Image (tube, rainbow, N blue to C red):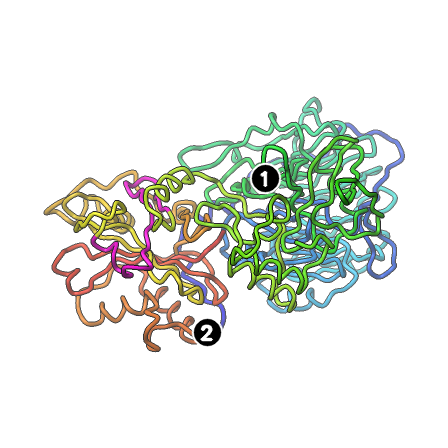
């Protein structure tokens, strides 16, 4: 078994899956103009059939599900935010994707070759297996417990729950777009009319002159008319401002649209509004002025801006609105006061495709590319490959210089010659400058700055071997602890990260000393002063094969510092009113992270060069004794003994099962062998027990 499902008993899930409201009985269209529609969708047809894409690559898009969100980058890779309850966020390995959809329990990606990829699950596991065999897919969508796909010939297929007839689409033809609700499917025909399965609101089949359609929830459907107006089954005021629309999203909680000028108009129910008691997030959509795409989920709205960034509004207790890290289109990275790198273009992309993409993301009418030879610009053909060093202009003005990571010889590919050059850079045998140096820097250091080292060579080797791809988008950081981390590194080069846990006093650099001893910071402060309190420190840096990052610190009972307040989190979530360490603490436990809420059990750490986020899936304290010692060795993956080193899937699987079984509270999540793990621990509550290896453990999987 490669999949381990943690226990499900968390009441907040019921809230996340609740409908948002909205009047499904109001089916009166508004602002319908009887002019000729133009419902042509976009994309290249792999089978040579009817539907065509305007560009051979995606221009980026967003999709909002029940408790998660998706972002599709212009290079065909995907990002996600929110809860991974069903495994629906496991999209980081997707490639060559041109369209994405987010449902209740599944994420769907349409690949450039017309096949589908999935993350998550349906109740009927055979349905996903059947859908995985579909070919010539143009777009797809996911409903409550089913998936549907529009094929290039204008027909539709569906699989999964069909209890309401939501999969009865076999007779449809001449379809140019589809959308799914919880238990229905609607299709937009080439003549601007709408077809629907039996569970859909009946009024939609009378709509005419529609050019785009969206659906969601129990009975929410919305369409854009040929005149740019709105028709919807939801209750929307006639003077609500839905005009000149270019994109639309709908769910039971409401409808949201993007106007041609990039502004956003919404009509949303009360359940989606800001509520600080539930840690909901809010983005004022009236301030968005450069939107190009929108999607409405169960209780949240996601917008993609022209530059490829994203914003979200609504319920955020599952972090579904946490899309600030989405970078979906090429962007500028400042290398110096005079040089900006154009990042995010795909290896193997033609100049023609890159022109369209850059023009769209820069908001320009035109983009031009040129090679620079002996300081003179030379024209390139549209069929040429984009390469490092090409100069880009938008509407005639200088924009930036292309940087493709790995392409240091400026020919648009990464091969043995690039590898040889990068090897010299990593050993300081050569030191290029500017955009060539940036192309050689495939890694980031502890503060997120690019550099070139052994991992750069390993990635290039894997790319050449065809076992990995070189991502051209840098991972976006919130940067919330960057200054604290930079200050800590400036004070002590042994700093490898930073940990801060909201609603506690835990706010420390993470140390590691690879020279004087792995346990040096057990009894030394970050200032290298000997102290019983020691530091927060990491284990085993230099063992990159380990998938379990281990971070520990003392339970400093008298001062209540270091990792003592991990016990406060534990005891608060077990229902205790005061700290059980009565000799030194005994504080009232209040205003601490409630681990029933997903956002409270996702912690952000900067460690070993990356800002990472981790979801807790186990929490427990061991009792003193021989078994506690064995559990400690097992949980830190002690690498010097075959009994504890996790070098096989079987050993990792057994370890995961133990963590889930031992947890003092149940967590609703999915953990797999493909995950990376984080073990955070401190000494037991009583000093005497700690001397017998009693420890408090928090175990996490990486989600970002």
**In the shown orientation, is residue 687 left or right of residue 654?**
left
Q: Is residue 522 magenta?
A: yes
Q: CA distance from mark 2 to mark 1?
A: 42 Å
Residue ID for mark 2: 649
Q: Nearer the viewer, residue 143 or 429?
A: 429
Q: Which mark is residue 335?
A: 1
Q: Nearer the viewer, residue 410 or 42?
A: 410
Magenta range is: 498-523
Residue 640 placement (x, y as % from top left): 33, 73
Q: Is residue 23 above or below residue 381?
A: above
SS of the residue at dot 2? helix
Q: Residue furthest left?
A: 583
Residue 289 placement (x, y as % from top left): 65, 27
**In the shown orientation, is residue 569 left or right of residue 30?**
left
SS of the residue at dot 1? loop
Q: Is residue 186 magenta?
A: no
Q: Name the residue rendered at 79%, 57% in the picture.
A: 151
Q: Name the residue rendered at 20%, 57% in the picture.
A: 684
């Amino acid at each position: 078994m490669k999949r381990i499902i943690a226990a499900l008993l968390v009441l907040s899930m019921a809230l996340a899956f609740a409908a948002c409201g909205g009047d499904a009985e109001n089916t009166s269209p508004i602002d319908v103009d009887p002019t000729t529609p133009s419902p042509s969708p976009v994309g290249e047809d792999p089978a040579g059939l009817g539907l065509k894409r305007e560009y051979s690559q995606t221009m980026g898009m967003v999709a909002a599900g029940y408790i998660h969100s998706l972002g599709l980058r212009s290079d065909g890779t995907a990002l996600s935010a929110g809860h991974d309850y069903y495994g629906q966020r496991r999209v980081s390995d997707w490639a060559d994707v041109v369209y994405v959809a987010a449902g209740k329990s599944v994420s769907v990606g349409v690949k450039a070759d017309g096949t589908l990829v999935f993350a998550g699950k349906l109740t009927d596991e055979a349905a996903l297996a059947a859908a995985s065999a579909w070919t010539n897919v143009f777009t797809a969508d996911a409903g409550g417990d089913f998936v549907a796909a529009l094929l290039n010939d204008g027909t539709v297929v569906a699989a999964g729950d069909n209890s309401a007839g939501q999969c009865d689409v076999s007779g449809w033809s001449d379809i140019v777009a589809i959308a799914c609700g919880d238990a229905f499917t609607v299709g937009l025909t080439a003549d601007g009319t709408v077809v629907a399965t039996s569970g859909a609101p009946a009024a939609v089949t009378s709509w005419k002159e529609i050019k785009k359609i969206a659906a969601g929830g129990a009975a929410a459907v919305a369409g854009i008319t040929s005149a740019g107006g709105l028709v919807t089954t939801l209750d929307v005021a006639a003077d609500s401002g839905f005009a000149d629309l270019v994109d639309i999203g709908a769910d039971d909680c409401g409808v949201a649209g993007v106007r041609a000028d990039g502004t956003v108009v919404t009509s949303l129910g009360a359940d989606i509004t800001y509520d600080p008691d539930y840690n909901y997030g809010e983005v004022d959509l009236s301030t968005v002025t450069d939107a190009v795409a929108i999607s409405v989920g169960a209780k949240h709205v996601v917008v993609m801006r022209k530059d490829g960034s994203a914003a979200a509004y609504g319920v955020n207790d599952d972090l579904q609105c946490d899309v600030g890290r989405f970078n979906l289109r090429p962007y500028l990275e400042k290398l110096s006061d005079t040089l900006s790198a154009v990042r995010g273009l795909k290896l193997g992309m033609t100049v023609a495709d890159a022109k369209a993409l850059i023009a769209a993301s820069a908001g320009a009418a035109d983009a031009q590319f040129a090679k620079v030879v002996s300081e003179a610009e030379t024209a390139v053909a549209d069929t040429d490959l984009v390469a490092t060093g090409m100069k880009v202009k938008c509407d005639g003005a200088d924009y930036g210089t292309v940087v493709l990571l790995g392409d240091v010889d400026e020919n648009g590919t990464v091969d043995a010659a690039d590898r040889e050059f990068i090897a010299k850079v990593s050993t300081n045998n050569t030191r290029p400058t500017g955009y060539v140096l940036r192309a050689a820097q495939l890694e980031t250091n502890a503060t997120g700055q690019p550099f070139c080292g052994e991992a750069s060579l390993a990635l290039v080797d894997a790319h050449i071997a065809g076992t990995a791809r070189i991502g051209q988008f840098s991972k976006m950081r919130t940067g919330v602890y960057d200054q604290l981390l930079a200050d800590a590194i400036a004070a002590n080069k042994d700093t490898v990260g930073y940990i801060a846990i909201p609603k506690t006093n835990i706010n420390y650099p993470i140390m590691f000393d690879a020279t004087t001893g792995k346990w040096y910071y057990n009894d030394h402060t970050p200032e290298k002063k000997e102290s019983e309190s020691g530091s927060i420190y990491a284990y085993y840096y230099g063992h990159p094969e380990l998938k379990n990052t281990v971070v520990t610190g003392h339970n400093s009972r008298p001062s209540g510092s270091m990792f003592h307040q991990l016990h406060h989190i534990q005891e608060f979530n077990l229902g205790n009113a005061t700290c059980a360490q009565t000799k030194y603490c005994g504080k009232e436990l209040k205003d601490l992270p409630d681990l029933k809420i997903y956002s409270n059990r996702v912690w952000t750490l900067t460690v070993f060069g990356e800002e990472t986020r981790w979801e807790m899936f186990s929490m427990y304290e061991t009792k003193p004794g021989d078994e506690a010692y064995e559990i400690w060795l097992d949980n830190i993956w002690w690498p010097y003994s075959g009994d504890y080193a996790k070098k096989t899937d079987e050993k990792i699987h057994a370890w995961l099962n133990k963590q889930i079984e031992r947890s003092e509270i149940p967590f609703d999540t999915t953990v797999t062998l493909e995950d990376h793990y984080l073990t955070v621990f401190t000494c037991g509550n009583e000093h005497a027990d700690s001397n017998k290896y009693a420890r408090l453990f928090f175990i996490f999987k990486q989600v970002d």
